Amino acid sequence: FSGLDTKEPNAVVVGLSPPHFDYNTMNKAFRLILDGAPLIAIHKARYYQTSGGLSLGPGPFVTGLEYAADVQATVVGKPQASFFQKALPSTGCQPHQAIMIGDDARDDVGGAQNAGMLGILVKTGKYRAGDEEKISPGPYLTCDSFPQAVDHILQHLV
């Protein structure tokens, strides 16, 4: 938001900004929403991988604001189908020709599959045992690594 006047905000935008997930900032956001500001979420990831382990993502904070203010956030990133569909024109692919490889069953794989793409889940990054069971339909494929997923694509889908 560099260059924007943020003294009198007219919207609440939540992304991944851990230093700002404190009570005072969240309460200010809550009050803005109550006064009519829309709640916009860059995405609603539950958690993400850091060098220190898994950490809370923006999802729990967005969900808390939704609950407290009795509103629904507009989600503009994963797992929304529109997020994935907007990337396709630059590739020249139709959804059924595209494959998403990701370590998040719900947001990466599930979102891509809801957009008509194939989804491959990799057991890296923030993957947790059993994640592939958390979406329906399940991933097209689950691989131990990104290179293994790419090898599968090259051997079976190209």
Image (cartoon, helix red, strand yellow):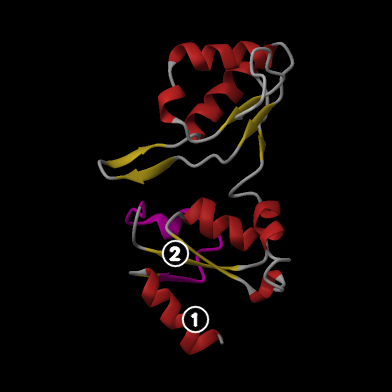
Q: Main secondary structure of the magenta part?
A: loop
Q: Quadrant of the N terminus?
A: top right
Residue at the limit of the structure toward the front, as seen here: 3
Q: Is residue 95 left or right of residue 154?
A: right
The residue positioned 59% from the left and 15% from the top of the image is 30
Please identify the quarter of the rendering in which residue 18 is found. top left
Q: Is residue 113 left or right of residue 122?
A: right
How many numbered callouts? 2
Q: Which residues are magenta?
A: 126-142
Query: What element does badge 1 sit on?
Result: helix
Question: Residue 96 location, x and y as percent?
Answer: 67, 73
76 or 6: nearer the viewer: 6
Residue at the limit of the structure toward the left, as seen here: 52
Residue 104 forms part of the magenta stretch: no
Q: CA distance from mark 1 to mark 2?
A: 13 Å
Amino acid type, mark 2: Leu
Q: Nearer the viewer, mark 1 or mark 2?
A: 1
Residue topped by disc 2: 121
Residue 153: mark in rendering: 1
The residue positioned 48% from the left and 85% from the top of the image is 154
106 or 19: nearer the viewer: 19
